[in-house]
Structures are given as structure tokens and as C-alpha cells.
Image (spheres, rainbow, N blue to C red):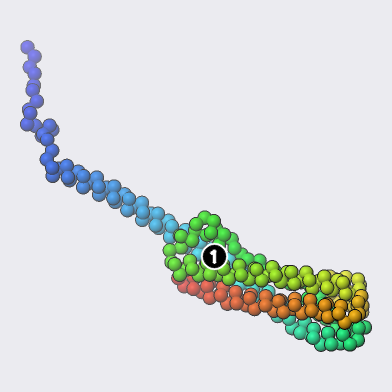
């Protein structure tokens, strides 16, 4: 005869849970989910901060490259400006004696071109296109980076205008002086013993030539000023960002 064991109705495994036990389970699950959410947020925050710091370091390296450019360009622009300061005296000589053009040899080579500033915008482009600015948690740092970029963009607009002035100056020289002298402008030595011969000797033609030369000179001086301002701004920004990091 088989003996059947009947479960006890009142055993712990089948008893109904009370409210406190359900509430405790809910609290445990809630805490587990919340702590997991907080841990994930902390991890993302630390990851974003690390990426933001890397962007700042990369931007500092870009600024250093820009600053090195600024130093070289300022020296060039200052030299060009000092050499061409005799442009007024040269005009007085040439306008009164159209064959006395030797003074043009000293100034024309420096009124047909200049070295461009090439913006090191590797990091700023990443910050803009990848939404990286939001990763830079210090608002002052982000604002400073944006401010520098805006200043550079303004300078690049002036540089474009200066390139137009350069083209006008070169065109005026091309129309006014003889081929041997014009060819000599692009010689590596940039030196000629013979004075340029004017193709047109009327006052209007001479004035047009010197007008274009003068416009280029003045705007190149403006380029020098803009680059000096950018250099100061970049150096201050490097110091500021390095002290913050």
C-alpha cells in the first residue's frame, strides 16, 4: 500500500507574502536599477570629461602651431613695411623724372606678394562637426575657444581682401614696367642693376601704379596688425587653458 505524503498547507514555501516583503523586494530592485543608472551616468561623465580634456590639449597644440606662424609672419610683414616706406619718396622722384626709376628696384619685389596665414583648425573643426564643444565642461574654456575661432575667421576675411590688393598691385606693375624688370621680380636673387623702364610715362599712369602699390602696402600693414593681435590672443589662451588643465 502506497503512502502519500500530503504537503502542509501552512508550510513557508507556499505561504502568501505580506506587504512588507513585496515592498522590500521593490526597494531592492529599485535600488539596483538606480545604482546601475547612476554608475552608467558617472562612467559617461568621466568618459566625456576625458574626451573634453583631450580636445583642449589638442587645441593647445594647434594654438602653438599658429603662434609659431604668427612670429614668422610678423617678422616678414614688418620687414616688407620698412623696406617699402620709401614709396612716397620714390613717387616724388619718378613723377618728376620718369627715367629715374632705380628706386622701384628696392620696393617692387615687396609689393607683389606676401605669405598667407594658414589656420591650424584641425581641432576646432572636430569640435564643430562632432559636437565636441559640449564635452568641454568649463563654459569659459569653450567660450574662449569659440572667441579665438571667430577672431581668426575675421582675419581670414581680411587676408582674402589683401590677396585681391596683391593681384591689383601685381597687375599695375605688369602694365607699367618693362619685361626684364618684371621678370626680375620673380628671380630668386630679386636684384637688378638696371632701372625699370616705364611703359607709360604720363602722370595718370604713374599715379595709378603708385596708388595700387600704396593700397597693397597699407593693407599689408593691416595684416601685420591683425596677426599681432592674434598672436597675443593665442599666447594668452595657451596660458589660460594650460593653467585650467
Residue 69 in sight from this viewpoint: no
**Residue 243 picture location, percent across and down:** 46, 73
The answer to whether residue 218 shows anywhere in this view is: yes
Measured as percent of width and height from the top left, residue 129 is found at: 54, 56
Viewer-nearest residue: 245 or 90: 90
Mark 1, residue position: 59
Give SS at disc 1.
helix
Instruction: Classify residue 164 as left or right of residue 179.
Output: left
| Vertical placement of residue 44 versus 242, above or below | above
Q: Which residue shows up at 39% across the image and 57% down it?
A: 45
Q: Residue at x 24, y 45 (%)?
A: 29
Q: Residue furthest front?
A: 204
Q: Is residue 81 above or below residue 18?
A: below
Residue 152 position within the rendered picture, expressed as x and y whole percent measured from the top left: 60, 69
Foreground residue among 103 and 56: 103
Residue in view at x 8 percent, y 18 percent? 4
Residue furthest toward the top? 1
Q: Label 1 neighbourhood size at 10 Å, few (<14), some (14-19), many (20+)?
A: many
Residue 79 vs residue 48: left or right? Answer: right
Q: Quadrant of the N terminus?
A: top left
The location of residue 188, given as percent across then percent down, is: 83, 71
Say which quarter of the image contains residue 222: bottom right
Amino acid at each position: 500500500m502506497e503512502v502519500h505524503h500530503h504537503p502542509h498547507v501552512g508550510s513557508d514555501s507556499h505561504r502568501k507574502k505580506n506587504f512588507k516583503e513585496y515592498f522590500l523586494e521593490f526597494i531592492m530592485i529599485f535600488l539596483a536599477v538606480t545604482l546601475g543608472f547612476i554608475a552608467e551616468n558617472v562612467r559617461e561623465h568621466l568618459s566625456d570629461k576625458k574626451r573634453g580634456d583631450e580636445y583642449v590639449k589638442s587645441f593647445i597644440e594647434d594654438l602653438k602651431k599658429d603662434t609659431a606662424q604668427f612670429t614668422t609672419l610678423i617678422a616678414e610683414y614688418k620687414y616688407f613695411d620698412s623696406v617699402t616706406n620709401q614709396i612716397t619718396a620714390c613717387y616724388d622722384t619718378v613723377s618728376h623724372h620718369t627715367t629715374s626709376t632705380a628706386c622701384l628696384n628696392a620696393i617692387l619685389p615687396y609689393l607683389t606678394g606676401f605669405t598667407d596665414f594658414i589656420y591650424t583648425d584641425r581641432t576646432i573643426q572636430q569640435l564643430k562637426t562632432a559636437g565636441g564643444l559640449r564635452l568641454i565642461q568649463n563654459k569659459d574654456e569653450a567660450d574662449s575657444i569659440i572667441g579665438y575661432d571667430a577672431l581668426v575667421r575675421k582675419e581670414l576675411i581680411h587676408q582674402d581682401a589683401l590677396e585681391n590688393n596683391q593681384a591689383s598691385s601685381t597687375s599695375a606693375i605688369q602694365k607699367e614696367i618693362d619685361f626684364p624688370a618684371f621678370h626680375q621680380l620673380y628671380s630668386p636673387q630679386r636684384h637688378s642693376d638696371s632701372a625699370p623702364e616705364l611703359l607709360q610715362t604720363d602722370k595718370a599712369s604713374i599715379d595709378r601704379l603708385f596708388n595700387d602699390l600704396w593700397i597693397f602696402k597699407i593693407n599689408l600693414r593691416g595684416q601685420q596688425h591683425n596677426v599681432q593681435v592674434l598672436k597675443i590672443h593665442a599666447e594668452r589662451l595657451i596660458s589660460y587653458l594650460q593653467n585650467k588643465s
